[in-house]
Structures are given as structure tokens and as C-alpha cells.
Image (cartoon, rainbow, N blue to C red):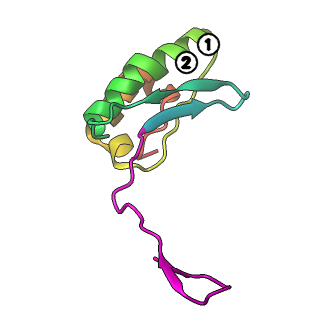
Amino acid sequence: MACSDPDTHSARIIEKTKQCGYVHVFGMMTSDGAVMDPVFFDSNESVNATTYLSKVLTEAIPWILARYASAQVVFMLNGAPAHTSNLAQDSLRTNLGQEGFWSKIR
């Protein structure tokens, strides 16, 4: 990237990294304002149906059950591929029940 110096009208080069670092984070909030602590994926871990489901089953579902054990809960996802995979959909339906999980076909 070249930037012009307004005093000398000469250009200087500003180097940028093309492969910036990244972080994959899983987070959740509820309609009553509760926020689950963020869950970080390992830096060498791809987010796919298996890794996503592992985080949901070990982090999110226990948090939901501890906070809302006796309440009716609906777990909704966006359309990310890991969320809409058959593996994730089937497992969430099994763990949360048909009423507690809004699947991609609902």
C-alpha cells in the first residue's frame, strides 16, 4: 500500500501481512441477557461439524442446563455449515428434544 506524504508529495510504502492471524470463538447469549463465557477453538483446529458439536456438547449444553434446568429453552443457530450439518442437527435434536431445538427444517 502506498501513502502520499502531504509535505513532500512523495510516496512511502506501508507493508501489510496478507495472512493475518485469526481466532475461532464460540459464544452464546440468551433472551434474558445472560452471556456464556467465550469458548475458543485451538489455533490448529478447523471449525467443522465435529469440532463445533464437541464445543456445543461440552460447553454450551451444560451451561444451558445448569442455568435453565427447569425452564423451557429453545436453541437456535444461524446457517453456518457446521450448524446445519446432519451430524449437528441430529445430535442437538437428540440432546435438546424436538421442542427445544429449532432445526434447519423448522
Q: Is residue 60 magenta?
A: no
Identify the amino acid type marked 2.
Ile
Q: Is residue 3 above or below residue 87?
A: below
Residue at screen point 27% across, 35% down: 45
Circle 1 SS class: helix
Local packing at callout 2 (Cα closer than 10 Å; few below 14, some 14-19, many 20+) is: some
Residue at screen point 47% across, 70% down: 14
Residue 67's disc is 1
Between 71 and 19, the one nearer to me in the picture: 19
Is the N terminus in the top left, top right, bottom left or bottom right quadrant?
A: bottom left
Residue 11 position within the rendered picture, expressed as x and y whole percent measured from the top left: 51, 84
Residue 60 position within the rendered picture, expressed as x and y whole percent measured from the top left: 48, 22
Q: Is residue 19 magenta?
A: yes
Residue 42 position within the rendered picture, expressed as x and y whole percent measured from the top left: 33, 31
Quick one: which residue is furthest to the right in this view? 32
Local packing at callout 1 (Cα closer than 10 Å; few below 14, some 14-19, many 20+) is: few
Asked whether the residues under the numbered discs 1 and 2 touch, taking CB atoms below 8 Å apart as contact, a structural biologist would say: yes
Q: In the figure, residue 69 lies in which quadrant?
A: top right
Instruction: Give the residues in magenta.
Output: 1-24
Quick one: which residue is furthest to the bottom in this view? 9
Q: Is residue 78 left or right of residue 68?
A: left
Residue 64's disc is 2
Between marks 1 and 2, how big is the CA–CA gap? 5 Å
Identify the amino acid type marked 1.
Arg
Q: Is residue 37 above or below residue 21?
A: above
Circle 2 SS class: helix
Residue at screen point 49% across, 41% down: 77
